[in-house]
Image (tube, grey):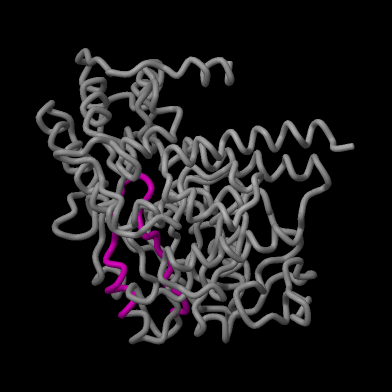
Amino acid sequence: MADPKRKKHYRNARRDDASARKASPWLAGRCAPQLDAVSRVRIGVSVERRPGRLPLDGPGSRGGVGSVTYFRDQFPVLRGGVYLDVAFKAAVPDPVVRAIAAFYAGVQHDGGDKGGWTRTVAAAREKIARLIAARPGEIAFVKNASEGMNLLAHGLRYSAGDNVIISDQEHETNEFPWTNLERRGLEVRRVPSRDLRFDIEDVAALVDSRTRVVSLAHVYPVSGFVPEVAAVGRLCRERGLYFFLDAVQSVGALSTDVRALGVHALATSGHKWLLGPYGAGFLYASPEFMQEAEPVFASKHYTASHGEELNTARRQDASRWEYGSLNYSGIAALEAGVDMILAVGPQRIEARIRELVMRLRQRAEEEGLEVASPPADGGAVSGVVSLRVPNAERVADRLRGQRIFVSARRGLLRASVDFYNNEEDIDAFVAAVAGRPFVLRREPDAEFQERVS
């Protein structure tokens, strides 16, 4: 006799699949033959939709599938509030939650399909590689950027007196792995900032014959400053140095091409701009770096195909850093977040963020608020904008009470803008900081509020 719980589960899957078909008939028709009902539970957005046909909201937009309005509907927090805190953590969209639910529904039913998990890992690896213009064999799954940067930093051999160059704005993610190596005689040099920025000359001034690595953030988490990454990449290659990036605040927000930037390695977490869960991130390692880098740990490689090397320490690609069982549910959820980013398009996301950040800066200046983040001056614009206000912690708490989510960092009030935000979000935030009344034309989602209460 068929298991009634299994019947109910598949009825729910089919019901959710019907909703996906109604929202995007082309999507459902394209993907349905390749996916079973359990897999289709999570499909609200998929990279499989036709590229180039997903316009952002603008004049004449009706908010159809692929518009910002459509994607906003995937984020419950936006139904009753303003979320400008993705630089802290993502308020994950519905497809990410569905991916985790579908994974554990399978685990509950029969322990799960490990072969299917392995295929998910391979698919996620390919999509992440596409996102940063890399190759799948150059991607390794890690818990987060902290783990990734530690694996990269400890992958090289150093002699006493060697040095690494970071900046004075680094997050601990890109500071502690290097200061930890000071006990082995590695010197850590810091590029000084002026008005929360520095230039290529400031980096070059610290390079000498004992420099091994330059390791910077792609986007600085408090200031939002974007350094001249491609210029630093060229400098490092000319001087025979390795160039690492802490990409926590960039990948998913800025269109990223690792070869154009000249980086040898980068690491990022999934729980911010990639819209994924905690505990699922990735690192990128170039072929040049992998020739010299040594794996820190060794274990069985649990997603190896038949006949492949099982000992991670002996593998020739980036999977040498994937020790032990992977976070399969987290990777499935991360894939869902990356699907959404690829569906919108990295260039469109970067352009939309630029529009909204420029609006935020303009509105803040009109209200007499001081923008602490340095101007872009024609360069890349990150989604991070910090304001200098008295008692930033207290202001952030007050805004949270109004369901406007931002952070206070190092005495500044930080807003972080993503593609799903709109002009009303920006205007409401600035008005609230200035102490002016504002009205959000939306109501909290009652079903969601009941679910989390």
Quarter-of-image position of residue 139: bottom right
Relative horizontal placement of residue 94, taking residue 79 as reference (left or right): right
Pinpoint residue 102: horizontal percent, then vertical percent.
Answer: 66, 42
- 25, 112: nearer the viewer: 25
Pinpoint residue 244: horizontal percent, then vertical percent.
Answer: 45, 69
Give above or below for 308 relative to 330: below
Relative horizontal placement of residue 72, taking residue 356 as reference (left or right): right
- 317, 79: nearer the viewer: 79
Residue displayed at 63% across by 38% down: 13
**Farthest-out residue, left:** 366
Region rendered in magenta? 211-234
**Farthest-out residue, right:** 1
Relative horizontal placement of residue 410, taking residue 278 as reference (left or right): left
- Magenta region includes residue 226: yes
- Magenta region includes residue 217: yes
Residue displayed at 21% across by 21% down: 431
**Farthest-out residue, top:** 437
Give above or below for 446 relative to 369: above
